[in-house]
Image (cartoon, rainbow, N blue to C red):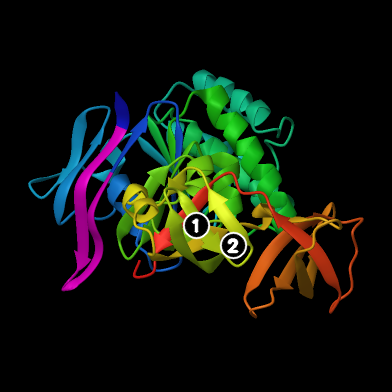
Amino acid sequence: MALLELQDVSYAYGAQKVVEQLSLRLPAGSIGCLLGPSGCGKTTVLRCIAGFEPVSSGTIRVAGDILSSPALHVEAERRRIGMVFQDYALFPHLTVADNISFGLRGSPVAAQQVRVQALLETVGLSGQGKKFPHELSGGQQQRVALARALAPRPRLLLLDEPFSNLDVELRERLALEVRSILAAEGITAILVTHDQHEAFTIADEIGVMHEGRIQQWDTPYNLYHQPANRFVADFVGQGVFLPGEVIGASRIQIELGILSGNMLAGGDADTIAGKVGSRVTVLLRPDDVVHDDASTLQAEVLAKAFRGAHFLYTLQLASGAQVLSLVPSHHDHAIGERIGIRLDVDHVVVFRVDD
């Protein structure tokens, strides 16, 4: 059974539609993510789930209970939903321990102290309870905000761009830590972010949003290798689209050679792969184009970005089209140099030219 379920949820500011007939299901104990560019409606969805905004249509259920519909709106404080905000929203005049215990007011003092100490240990801040927020680093403040949200044992936790104020290296490390903490607490959570690396690190399932709708709700692996449409293919990961022509059943000719095998195109693969002569575009990821000194197929290095273990090369083909290639960094080629390449494509992602 899904702990969180949104069915045909819509929301509008006056005449402006922000979210349109959005549906998703998140099982208990899972971490979901709404991923998309600024203005796509993802934070609005989170605010509707939290109870900060009413829905125009549709229903929001948590553990089977209807919390939002056009006829019913349960107040935010009665939803038993925790929230971690982008700016942490800690009380500067309260100690770390007092910040964490804020949501436990009304409980016996001894029980509060036990819960606070347990959470300090869980989030890696044992012995820091008497400090004030300004005495902590950004990553530590985020852990305090997480502990405070977890303290009352919410049935669902919402995280609104929780790592956006941190540096890139700390984001990924903290995302891994947060995933472990949520698993230890057995918490179901949903995250909002525009950062796909963050989403891939923490989430079990991700919904890619565009213009108020979920384009695809899937695992990170499937979003990357089996995108449902051009928007998802373009937004998730890196890649380029090359023109191609269907030359037979599950066979497509592109400039770099013939691709064959399973064709993936958001449910339209059979139609595309079976129409000989059809013009299509094919998605090539950087890991689909392999550097090979023995290959007779050559491409010119236009640009390169050092990634530590790898270079990300931008390569120009004979036609002028460009592809990306992820190459081990001991292959340090100069701009303007021609190098051998070959295709190694496991997932052939193809779209009609009018998609």
Q: Tell me the quadrant of the picture where the N terminus can be found.
A: top left
Q: Residue at x 69, y 38 (%)?
A: 130
Q: Give the range drawn in magenta.
A: 4-23
- Magenta stretch, main secondary structure, is strand
Viewed as shown, does residue 321 lie left or right of 42?
right
Callout 2 amino acid: Gly
Residue 346, disc? none
Residue 292 falls in which quadrant of the image? bottom right
Direction from residue 191 to residue 339 in the image, left or right: right
Residue 193 seen in the current view: no
Residue 167 is inside the magenta segment = no
Q: Which residue is drawn at 71% across and 59% down?
A: 167
The residue at the point 60 percent across, 37 percent down is 178
- Say which mark, if any, is on residue 252: 1
Image vertical order of residue 339 relative to residue 142, above or below = below
Using the image, determine if residue 147 lies above or below residue 343.
Answer: above
Which label is found at residue 239? 2
Whole-percent x, y for residue 20 in the image: 22, 59
Give whichever of discs 1 and 2 has the lower sequence position: 2
**Is 254 on the left-hand or right-hand side of 36?**
right
For discs 1 and 2, the disc positioned in front in the rendered view: 1
